[in-house]
Image (cartoon, rainbow, N blue to C red):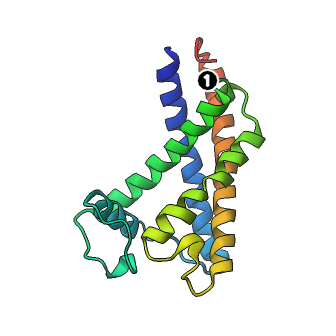
Amino acid sequence: MPEALGCLVGAAVVGTGATVVMDLWAVIRKRLLGVPSLDYALVGRWFVHLARGRFRHDPIGASPPVAHERLIGWTAHYLTGIAFAAVLLAFWGLGWVCRPAIGPALAVGIGSVVAPFFLMQPGMGAGIAASRTPRPGAARLHSLVTHGIFGLGLYGAGWGASLLLERLQWRGFC
């Protein structure tokens, strides 16, 4: 398998798996702590308005809804997870999928909190690092924990992928 194709497949598998783990955490967090999950319809709305040239909203919920915003938001969420998995593989190589290490996975997972802190939250009207929310400290902590969970998901999905590759005896990938 060509290395570029291997990186795309690896990023898709690992990023999707890690994003699923992050979403499971959101369900657990809501049940245990009563913290609502992010409304991906609003994420979709933000992305559509962004494509139309509008970055900042005050808040995004007051902006006009767009067709298929929930689907767009969920798709963007998973594509973002795949993109961060691609970053992991770009820095640590395709071999990371064959021998996952927790340090790089946590570095990328926790580092990925930069995107919501400095892009999504300001763009959606919550301010830099949720500074305009009622409880900025709590919002930041939840974001950091969630992205740490994403990092654990990258590691777990990497192990799952490596075990699957071994089981399938997929020669040439590792």
Identify residue for label 1: 165
- The residue positioned 60% from the left and 53% from the top of the image is 112
Q: Residue furthest bottom?
A: 134
- The residue positioned 54% from the left and 36% from the top of the image is 86
- The residue positioned 44% from the left and 47% from the top of the image is 79
Q: Quadrant of the C terminus?
A: top right
Q: Position of residue 120 (x, y in %)?
A: 47, 64
> Within 10 angstroms of label 1, few (less than 14), some, or many (20 or more) residues?
some
Name the amino acid type tagged 1: Leu
Whether residue 14 is visible here, answered yes or no, is no
Q: Position of residue 101 (x, y in %)?
A: 76, 36
Q: Residue furthest left?
A: 67
Name the one closer to the observer, 21 or 8: 8
Name the one closer to the observer, 134 or 22: 134
Q: Quadrant of residue 22?
A: bottom right
Q: Name the secondary structure under disc 1.
A: helix
